[in-house]
Amino acid sequence: MLTGLRRTRGKTATSTVITREELAHAMDQGAVTVLEALPAAHYAAEHLPGAINVPGDLAPADAARLLPDLGRTVVVYCSGPGCRRSTVTAAALTRAGHTDVRVYPGGKADWFAAGLPMERATVTSSAG
């Protein structure tokens, strides 16, 4: 579980909000699993470093296969503040038993605007 973050910083309906700075630090420490909740084509074009693509609805079996450690910090993001896919995926993870799920509401737009690195991929979805 990620320590040092203020769990009262912000909440979505089901999960804690994480800032860009907190996410970048957690990624540098290897203390977080990052999920992109956008279609595979968007993921392939650009995604946050090390992110796993989880497009569409996350079934409990997929969650268990992709993220077997229920206590690990998981951060979900999508395109930006107007995108609800991250909160839907975060809710599915919480229902599947994950205890530390966070949403990065700024998503790709915020990360890119800050000049932080992105990756490209030619693979399709890891889910399903």
Image (cartoon, rainbow, N blue to C red):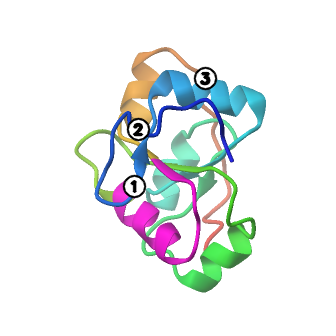
Q: Amino acid at mark 1?
A: Ser
**Mark linked to residue 86:** 1
- Label 3 crowding class (10 Å Cα cut-off): few <14, some 14-19, many 20+? few
Which corner quadrant holds the C terminus?
bottom right
* Residues under numbered marks 2 and 1 in contact, where contact means CB atoms less than 8 Å apart: yes
122 relative to 111 in the view: left or right? right
Determine crowd level at label 2: few under 14, some 14-19, many 20+ residues with C-alpha closer than 10 A.
many
Q: Left of 98 or right of it: where is 110? A: left
Residue 40 position, x and y percent, is 52, 59
Q: Residue at x 38, y 26 (%)?
A: 110
Secondary structure of the residue carrying numbered label 2:
helix
According to the picture, the residue beneath numbered tag 2 turns out to be 107
What's the distance in space between the residues labelled 3 and 1, CA to CA? 20 Å
Residue span colored magenta: 86-102
For disc 3, the marked residue is 117
Amino acid type, label 2: Gly
**Percent from the top left, x then y, of residue 100?**
57, 55
| In the image, residue 55 above or below residue 6 | below
Q: Which one is in front, 114 or 10?
A: 10
Could you tell me how far apart the alpha carbons at marks 2 and 1 are, in whole angstroms? Answer: 9 Å
